[in-house]
Image (cartoon, rainbow, N blue to C red):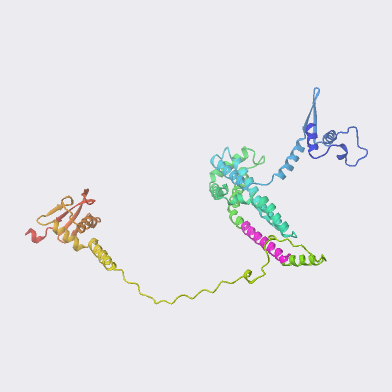
């Protein structure tokens, strides 16, 4: 009774006359509105009384409770796309992971996917409705107010913006579609879920395995199609949003152009001043101490024309005296560091004077050209571990050789034995 009284007071109902439906014969034994409301709810079957000893317990009729729940759901029917995607993904993964015990997850995922699809269609339908409401307003202020309140705050930011964030669960839509396709291709999994549907009471009593499998396949195909079609549907919503914003900009622009501009307002002001009929009209200036421009010195003077550029003779710039030396030095350095087969052969001959074999550790580097030649010898034999260079053979070894100049793969140079030498 107390809750009924509180509810009536919140709606501003304090007397029994405000609850009367115009029946003059109705019993007026009580003057308090909450008692009348209680008796009406009891007599019409919304409330039921149960007496236990000297206490009376009041409960709501189960059918009436279901009706109120359905009415309440109407006001909370908006499905948040982020939560819908998460529910579908989690339920589908649970059904795939444990088909015997979590088969109900597939049915829940199917229902959530349907609500998700209806929510997406509701966004587009809401855009069309708001477009008609916006463009039907008579002035630009009402158009902008409706656009920002109904479209931006009420629809676009509440639902659509969730789909455009980078970390939104909506990005899992491809995972959901792929998982549903994999489950459709697994015949054993479909059989397990179908049997679980029958055992857990998801199917109607007396249903067969074949009927349950048909339902499982239909639900998986629906989930797969919903999340595969979301991309094109999103593009349609995006195109509609762009078109709506362009139409609003164009409408507001032309309404402002066609309305009263500054010229019209000045003309109307002059007409109103002419009707005053007073010879002395006081005009207050922002700077009363500043006089009007009554001399030529106060008038605007255009700037003098610019003088033409002075004629000068073009001079060829002198050549840098150090350029020739720079070119010569770079040419000599390039010639010094460039390694050729002839330079390598000459380097090997200098190192092999009076010897038949020499290792890389025994070679002495005396100049920059020797360094580049020394570095190039192991690279020359890198492909086949051995290479012929004139009358010498260069062979790589497993160790490495390090000196004050460089650290390279160890190698040895051997004089090649010919038939003439053997004789």
The answer to whether residue 219 of the structure is visible from this angle is yes
Main SS category, magenta section = helix
Residue 215 locus on image (x, y percent)? 62, 46
Residue 49 locus on image (x, y percent)? 80, 30
- Look at the image and tell me in which quarter the N terminus lies: top right
Total count of labels? 0
| Residue 108 or residue 380, whichever sits in front | 380
Is residue 341 shown above or below 410?
A: below
Tell which residue pokes out farthest to the left in this image: 423
Left/right of residue 66 with respect to residue 344 in the rendered view: right
The verdict on residue 107 being magenta is no
Residue drawn 17% across the image and 59% down it: 347
Residue drawn 62% across the image and 39% down it: 198
Range covered by the magenta-colored residues: 236-262
Left/right of residue 170 with respect to residue 32 in the rendered view: left
Tell which residue pokes out farthest to the right in this image: 25
Is residue 40 shown above or below 78?
A: above
Quadrant of the rendered structure where residue 108 is? top right
Residue 63 locus on image (x, y percent)? 76, 38
Residue 61 locus on image (x, y percent)? 77, 35
- Look at the image and tell me in which quarter the C terminus lies: bottom left
Is residue 370 shown above or below 189?
A: below
| Residue 307 or residue 157, whichever sits in front | 307
The verdict on residue 248 being magenta is yes
Is residue 209 shown above or below 300?
A: above
The answer to whether residue 339 of the structure is visible from this angle is no
């Amino acid at each position: 009774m107390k809750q009924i009284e509180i509810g009536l007071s919140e709606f501003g109902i304090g007397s029994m006359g405000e609850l009367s439906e115009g029946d003059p014969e109705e019993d007026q034994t009580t003057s308090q509105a909450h008692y009348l409301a209680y008796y009406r709810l009891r007599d019409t079957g919304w409330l039921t009384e149960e007496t236990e000893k000297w206490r009376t317990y009041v409960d709501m009729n189960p059918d009436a409770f279901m009706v109120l729940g359905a009415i309440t759901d109407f006001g909370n029917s908006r499905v948040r796309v982020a939560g819908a995607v998460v529910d579908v993904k989690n339920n589908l993964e649970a059904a795939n992971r444990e088909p015997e015990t979590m088969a109900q997850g597939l049915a829940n995922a199917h229902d959530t996917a349907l609500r998700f699809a209806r929510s997406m269609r509701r966004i587009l339908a809401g855009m069309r409705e708001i477009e008609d409401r916006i463009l039907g307003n008579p002035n630009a202020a009402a158009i902008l107010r409706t656009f920002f309140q109904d479209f931006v705050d009420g629809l676009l930011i509440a639902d659509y913006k969730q789909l455009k964030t980078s970390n939104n669960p909506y990005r899992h839509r491809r995972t959901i579609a792929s998982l549903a396709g994999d489950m459709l291709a697994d015949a054993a999994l479909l059989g397990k879920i179908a049997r679980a549907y029958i055992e857990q009471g998801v199917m109607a009593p007396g249903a067969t395995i074949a009927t349950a499998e048909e339902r499982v396949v239909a639900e998986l195909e629906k989930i797969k199609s919903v999340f595969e079609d979301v991309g094109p549907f999103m593009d349609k919503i995006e195109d509609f949003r762009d078109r709506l914003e362009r139409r609003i900009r164009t409408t507001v622009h032309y309404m402002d152009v066609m309305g009263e501009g500054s010229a019209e307002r000045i003309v109307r002001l002059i007409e109103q001043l002419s009707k005053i009929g007073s010879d002395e009209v006081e005009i207050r200036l922002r700077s009363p101490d500043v006089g009007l421009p009554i001399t030529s010195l106060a008038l605007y003077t255009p700037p003098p024309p610019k003088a033409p550029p002075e004629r000068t003779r073009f001079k060829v710039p002198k050549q840098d005296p150090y350029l020739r030396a720079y070119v010569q030095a770079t040419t000599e350095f390039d010639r010094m560091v460039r390694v050729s087969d002839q330079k390598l052969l000459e380097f090997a001959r200098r190192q092999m004077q009076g010897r038949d074999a020499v290792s890389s550790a025994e070679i002495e580097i005396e100049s920059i050209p020797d360094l580049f030649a020394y570095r190039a010898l192991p690279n020359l034999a890198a492909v086949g571990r051995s290479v012929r260079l004139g009358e010498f053979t260069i062979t790589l070894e497993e160790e490495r050789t390090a000196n004050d100049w460089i650290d390279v793969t160890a190698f040895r140079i051997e004089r090649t034995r010919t038939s003439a030498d053997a004789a």
